[in-house]
Image: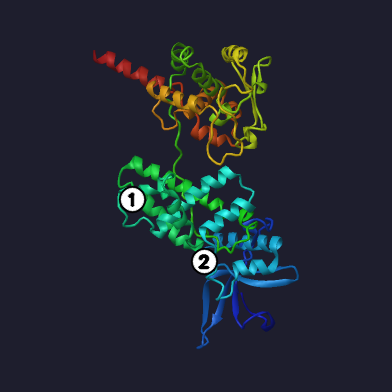
Amino acid sequence: MITQQDMKNGPEMVQLVVQPKIVSRSSKTHPEYWKARLVRRSYRNKEGKLLEIPEWHVRIAILKRRQWFNLGTPNQSTAATKARDIYLSLTSQGWDKTLERFKPSPGEKADCCTVGEFIKNIETSSHLRPITIRRYAVKLRKMISDIAGLEDGIKEKTKFSKYDYVNGGRESWRLKVESQKLNILNAESINRWRNEYIAKSNNDPLKRKSAERSAASYLRCIRALFAPDVTLALQVPLPTNPFLGVKIKEPAVMRYHSSIDPELLLISGKRELIKKDSQQYLALCLCLYGGLRRKEADLLTWSQVKLETGELEIRRTIYFEPKTEDSQRNIDLSSEAIEILRDFKAKSESEFVLDGNDPRPNATYEYYRADRTWRKLNEWLRKKGVKDTKAIHMLRKESGSIMASNFGIEDARQHLGHGDIRTTSSHYVSKKARREVIIKNVTDQLNLNKSDVL
C-alpha cells in the first residue's frame, strides 16, 4: 500500500510498504525479525512522477525516539542483517553513537579509522583471544595489501622483504598496510579480491579447489572481526560492515581418504623410535590411540591420565584452553595404550606427559612445548608414506575413522570431541570395509547362460 508520510516526521515523501502476510516471530536480535519490517520508500520528482528508491529502509523506534535508516542495499537478507546491527547498536550504545556510525552527516562520512587503529582497538576492547586476533589480523593485512595494490609493480625479490623480521622489511610493510583507511573494504572490493585470488590457480582443478578453500577461509576469518559482538565494543569510527552483500561460497567438503596403515605405523614406531627417540613414539600413540589434537597432547598432564579407569580427561587447565566446550571429553583407551602410558609415567619426572619446554598460555602464535618432538615425528611420518600437509593431524583423523568403523559415527564424534556430527562424517571418516552391490539372481543367471553356451 502507499501512504503519505507525516510532515512532522521528515521530508514530504511517500513510501511503498511491503508487508508479508506472515510476520516473523523471531526476536529483534535475529535478522528474520527485521525482514518483515523493511520498507521500499518512494518519492515524487519535480514532474510529480512517483519513483521508487531501490535500497531497503527501516524505521526503528526505541528510547523515546524513532528514525529512518537507509540500509544501502536492495538485497533483503543483507538489509535485514544491517537493521539488526543498528538495533543492537541502539540498545548498547544509544542514539548518538549509532547515528554517527550508521547515519553520518555528509561531512562526517569520510571519517574512518585506519586498519592499524581497527586492529589495535580489537586487541584492547574485544572478547577475542590474542591468538585468534593475531590469526585474523594476518589475513586482514594480506587482503588490504592486495586490494590497495601495495605490491603492484614491485620486483619479485623485493616482495619477499615483507618477511624480513631482522632488517625492518616486515615492519615497513606492516606500517604501509595499517596506514590504509578501513573503508577500502567494501562488498565490491572484497568480491573482486576473491575472484582474482581464485583466478591465479589458472585451470588446474586441484589448485583451483585449494584456492577456493583458502579464499573462503580468509573471508570467514576477516568477517568475524566485523561481527556485532566485536564492533559494538570498539571506540574507533567504523565504516558500514563491508561484508554486507558478500556471500561466502563454501567449497565442497574435503572428505578424508585413509592412506595410513595404523598397525604398520605402531609396529614401525616401536621398532625404530622407542630407543632412538621414545618421545616421538609416545606422541604417535597419543594421537593415534587417543585421537588427540596436537595442542591437546602437547599440554596433557599426567593428572589427566586415569590409568585405573583407562581414560584420558581432556579438560580446561591453567595451561590449556579447549578449542570448544565439546572438546572437553573423556577418552577410553585400549589395554595396549594403557600399558604404554603406564611405562612412560613410571620413568617421567615431568608434570606433562610429553617432555618439552615450559608452557606459554598467553602466546599469540602457535607455540608447542614439545616442538622438537612434533617436527621429528612429522619427518618420520613422511618417510612412512604419510604425504598430507598436516601429517600429524592425519593420525587424529585415522583414529576417528577407526572408531566410526568399529562403533559408529556418534562414538567417533564423542571420541574426537566434535560439537556437530556432520564435522565428523564429512572430514574425519574414511570407508574401511568393502560395501559391494551384489544382485545374486542376475549373477546366477549369467553363470547359467555361460554354461549353456559351453
Q: Is the Cβ of the residue at disc 2 closer than 8 Å to that at disc 1?
A: no
> Which of the two marks, 2 or 1, is nearer to us in this view?
1
Which label number is shown at residue 158? 1
Q: Is residue 38 above or below residue 128?
A: below
The disc, 2 or 1, on the residue closer to the chain's N-terminal end is: 2
Task: Using the numbered discs, state the Cα–Cα distance from disc 2 to disc 1 in whole angstroms.
Answer: 43 Å
| Image quadrant containing the C terminus | top left
* Front-lying residue, 349 or 31: 349
Q: Is residue 243 above or below residue 319?
A: below
| Image quadrant containing the N terminus | bottom right
The residue at the far right in this view is 64
| Secondary structure state at the residue bearing disc 1 | helix
Residue linked to disc 2: 74
Residue 438 picture quarter: top left
Residue 342 picture quarter: top right
The amino acid sitting under disc 1 is: Thr
